[in-house]
Image (cartoon, rainbow, N blue to C red):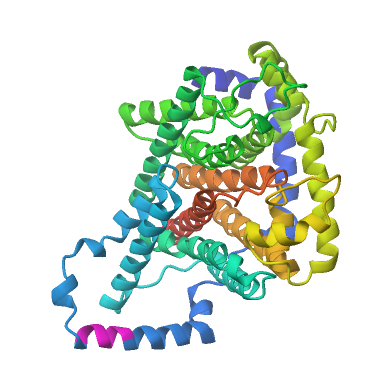
Amino acid sequence: MNRAIEIWNSSILGRVLTAICLWFSGQWQRSRVVRAFVAPMAGRQAAESSVFFRLWDLIRGGLCALYRRLGLERLFGGSIFLCLTLWCSAAVVLAPLLPTMAVLALAAVAFSSLALNLVRDRARPLAYSPVNRYILLYAAVYLAATATSVTPRQSLFPGLLMVFFMVFALVVENAVDSWERAEQLVFLMVLAGGVVALLGVGQYVLGATGDAAWVDSDMFSSVTIRVYSTLQNPNVLAEYLILMISLGGAALLTAKGTGKRLVLLACCGVMCLCMVLTMSRGGWLGLLIAGMIFLVLLNPRVLVLAPVVLPVALVALYFVLPDTVISRFTSIGNLEDTSTSYRVSIWMGTIAMLKDYWLCGIGPGTGAFNLVYPAYSYNAANAQHAHNLFLQIMSDGGVVALVVFLLIIFIFCRVICSALSRNRSWRARCYLAGAIGGVGGFMAQSMTDYTFYNYRVALLFFAVLALGASFARLAEQEVEDR
């Protein structure tokens, strides 16, 4: 491998491409826009000077005093409920394997554990990330949308559940306080992803049947099975796999020890196979975008090689992949496919609805959507949601909810890119690239589906946001320590 790299670097083509890369890199790094984007954001001191932090500090001080006065240390000292990492890991790792209510119970215990740790130890700092304030703001907007829903009773439970899973990101970020714990949590998440994917492959082998509406039988007569594993829907499974494969790739590239590498390689391999078997075109596209983001951030020279390597890779895939997969992928955007035309009809109907409800939305949940949407449906297309994350967010909470959510993604990307520009550690760069790649791929699939429809996937998405913010914080600490 090293010999091949030496030959490439000494070749005329290699030197020319390297010179081109260095020139573009210099122009890119000297850009004012780029320098402003990757500049470190306001840190903990700026956050602690805010009115909200002072209010939180005052409340926490009172709770700490009450904890001591009631002598609760005798009750909770050495309790398993103080093991924040344990409960946080249980909720995140088991999310794809357990029912939503069981995951909610584990998340509630993890929240209680965090609160108990903060009240018990007054000196324990609360982990901070610039992303946190926007997640909390988004949760507040979502609560307001729940209260002002067209049907508050039917929006109450889905609204509160979504808010709870949003702010669970704070628990994840406080549980990950070192690279060792971050790597352990990622390893367990990828291991669970491997189990979920293995169950999906088992469904394909055993010929499990699914909903006939998942496939256009006229256009794809050869597609008889779309696996869904423990997540009840092939597209939902694809959304989950995008996040796990991205983290799994980062863990694989940084793993130490042959045994761990083999386990991670097996998990990533079976997850990729399961992704193919979902027959989810949005999932395939999202995974491709996640991989491109991951590779470009690890080595920007990929951009120069892409015009040469990409056509060769596409030709190779054409001869390797089954005809079913090729025809399915090339049908993206084909309105003759009933699935595509169905989505377009729903988007048009949702946009027509939002013309009247753009400011505050109609409220979260399928109950609110089913109450209002039928009056605007296009081509009599019935739906439980908008089949587009961004349209659905605007439907749930209006334009304010959409703007705040986009700010979450923007600030997340800025935090990750800032850490990437300052830290040259291979481990940090892999995990940072994996986190932003997974989120980028997830957002790509969100253009064709409501990716928060499954609450467990929504929990995992915000957990990955928190993991990415934790990777950035740990990377910045490494830079400061050096």
Asked whether 314 or 155 is in front, the reply is: 155
Q: In percent of the image, x 67 and y 66: which residue is there? A: 363
Establish if 17 lies above or below 406.
above
Q: In percent of the image, x 19 and y 71: which residue is there? A: 76
Q: Is residue 49 visible?
A: no
Magenta stretch: includes residue 65: yes
Q: In percent of the image, x 72 and y 24: which residue is there? A: 328
Magenta stretch: includes residue 447: no
Q: From this viewpoint, which residue is outermost toward the left? A: 74
Q: In percent of the image, x 60 and y 54: which residue is there? A: 417
Q: Is residue 420 visible?
A: yes
Q: Is residue 44 left or right of residue 24?
A: left
Q: Please identify the quarter of the rendering in which residue 482 is found.
A: bottom left
x, y percent for residue 329: 72, 26
Looking at the rendering, the stretch of residues picked out in magenta corresponds to 63-68
Q: How many marks?
A: 0
x, y percent for residue 130: 55, 67
x, y percent for residue 212: 65, 29
Q: Please identify the quarter of the rendering in which residue 278 is found.
A: top right
Which secondary structure type mostly characterizes the magenta part of the structure? helix
x, y percent for residue 108: 38, 63
